[in-house]
Amino acid sequence: MKNQERFAELFTDYLEGELDDAALTELRELLASDESLLKSAADLYQTHHLLGMVVDGTQSRKEKFIRETLSRLPVDTGNFVSQVMADIDQISNDGQVVRHSIKPLSNMTSENSRLEKRKLHRGLITTALIAVLALSAYSFRSNKNTGLAGKVPNPSTEDVTQSEARFAHMAHAKFFGELLPPVNSALAFGRDYVLMSGLVEIEFPEGASAILEGPAVFRVLTDECLALDVGRCSVHAPDGAEGFRIETPVTSVVDRGTRFAISVSETSETEVQVIEGAADVYQKPDRPTGQIGLKQQSQQKFQVRMASNEAQSFTHLGKFSADAVPFNSSVYHRQLPDRVISYQATKDANGRAEMLTSVRLQRGGIIYDIPVEDLIPIEVISFTGHSGHAHVATKGLLPSHRSETSSDYSLITGVINPDGSREPLTSDPVLSESGDPGKSETPGMAIHFKSPVINGPGPDVVFFDLQTFGNPPEGDAFHVSPLKFTEGLKSHTIHAYDLTMESPAALDLQGFQIHMFEEKVKSLEMLETAQCASRFAGMKFRGLAVGIDLSDLGYENGDSVDGLFIQDAMDDVHNVDPVFIGGLPSQLEVQNIKPGKSLR
């Protein structure tokens, strides 16, 4: 049996925990005799970490083997640190194992395939201890040669060549170990990007675009070629962009004027789904992805031309193979989800924002810039809040009508820290204006739109929240509910904002005053009249934003909504701080606003 085939068999058994001492010795000897297998071991090893799989880190035999393998890797292996980065979502204090499910990459119906995948996925796990060991081993070798103790190079400061490919759009994206790159920023040639979650769209100079879905590891090889090591990618190459190429560990997929989706598993199995047009799939030569040039693709052995509504899976474990799989168009992303993209505001001399002037959002797949004057204002009609909290934010002194701070365009004023509930509402809330002295008001705040909001595609309401560093970076979670529950209506919980603390589009805010209430605020009347102590909010805040889609509450398209009920989700000690809430104009009115470009 060839070394490569035997290595694949032994290393798979090793990751499954089924390797005995004799087989481990054989695997070690294979690695010692064939240097090319070292990188294969490292590549396969790192992909499991990128999917965040964790087990008990007490297996010293694995630890010793990985230490030996890493010690023999060359010191100039480029981005090896990024190749072994792990996303350890949760490890309990007592060392209990937390396993993460793996989303299937296809809807294959073959029972044998399912059994094989289940066995492999069950075995593809490594330890958090070994992940730390791998990073430490590389860091130690690098530091020894450079004299920099414990310092990891910052990719943004490296001398790299920028491509003409651009990050065009992002939605709930998170990259490992770095803040989000600004929209329209260039990608560096050859740099590994590790997208942990969310979606990013990359536009290439000849017109092709690719939407990457996390978790994914990718890099730009040329201005018309993207390498995908693991993850999902949806490609659109319009007329004039033919020849755009996606490199995976086992294939080269060349566009022939099409839309197609690619999924690369942690074992490098590559699935291609052609949605429209055609694509040519070539077997990958046995050499590193970065060494394959555009001129060399003619020398590659042609494998198959795929047409619309066709799907195949390609593997290379010892030998190259291709198998038909069921076609599944749902894996293809034509566009990023509707969301709040950014906003504009007035700024002081230090660049800190105050008054909202416009909101950019995607609605029904089309980007709009909506002036704040076209948003539907709200008024607070009911409120309760805990004692010892700040419940009003202002630019200075309290106004005569405190709740009116929620009706202006300011991002630093409003009625904040409403009460809440762990469980969202399932029935009508009791409001301040109900006039029933026998019922306590429902914890939270109710808002009324100055004119009805008509449910349309995408976000129907924009919601802005004050947030500071140290608080949840995704934003304070909250429930949003109908004021009147009728058949089909329900509450909806927002866990993550469209613009988070990590979003470049979330602006730093000016300083403001907060007004602390010693007593529990039981009603809107008490909010207006109770004594409170004022002080300056000394911490730095940012304005986070999220779109609320009324369809998520069960409203039908075209339904008219007069108001909503907001409750903090009570999932931590931090309460939501709404400083601006505005309804979007109707779809007919939005169509009269000059839109941005339609996506894809």
Image (tube, rainbow, N blue to C red):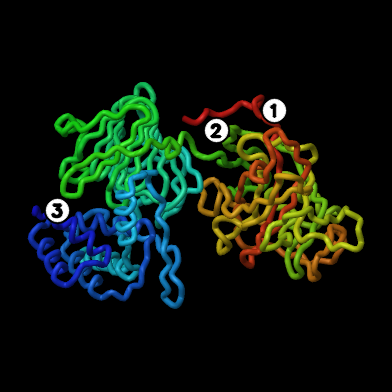
Decide which of tag 3 and tag 1 comes sooner along the chain: 3
Quarter assignment of residue 431: bottom right
What secondary structure is found at the residue carrying circle 2? loop
Which residue is pictured at 26% across the width and 63% down the height? 15
Q: Is residue 361 above or below residue 308?
A: below
Q: CA distance from mark 1 to mark 2?
A: 16 Å
Residue 161 visible in this rendered orientation of the protein: no
**Mark 2 Cα-neighbour bin, 10 Å: few <14, some 14–19, many ≥20:** some
Which residue type does callout 1 highlight?
Glu
Which residue type does callout 3 highlight?
Glu
Q: How many numbered marks, from 0 up?
A: 3
Comparing 44 with 124, the one in front is 124
What secondary structure is found at the residue carrying circle 1? helix
What secondary structure is found at the residue carrying circle 3? helix
Which residue type does callout 2 highlight?
Gly
> In this figure, which residue is indicated by the disc labeled 1?
589
**Mark 1 Cα-neighbour bin, 10 Å: few <14, some 14–19, many ≥20:** few
Mark number displayed over residue 365: 2
Image side of residue 189 versus residue 211, left or right: left
Report x, y in % for residue 57.
33, 73
Decide which of tag 3 and tag 2 comes sooner along the chain: 3
* Residue ranking furthest to the bottom: 94
Q: CA distance from mark 3 to mark 1?
A: 63 Å
Mark number displayed over residue 554: none
> In this figure, which residue is indicated by the disc labeled 3?
5
Quarter assignment of residue 102: bottom left
Comparing 188 with 572, the one in front is 572
Report x, y in % for residue 358.
64, 38
Image side of residue 502 versus residue 117, left or right: right
**Mark 3 Cα-neighbour bin, 10 Å: few <14, some 14–19, many ≥20:** few
Residues at marks 3 and 2 touching, judged by CB atoms closer than 8 Å: no
Image side of residue 197 versus residue 79, left or right: right
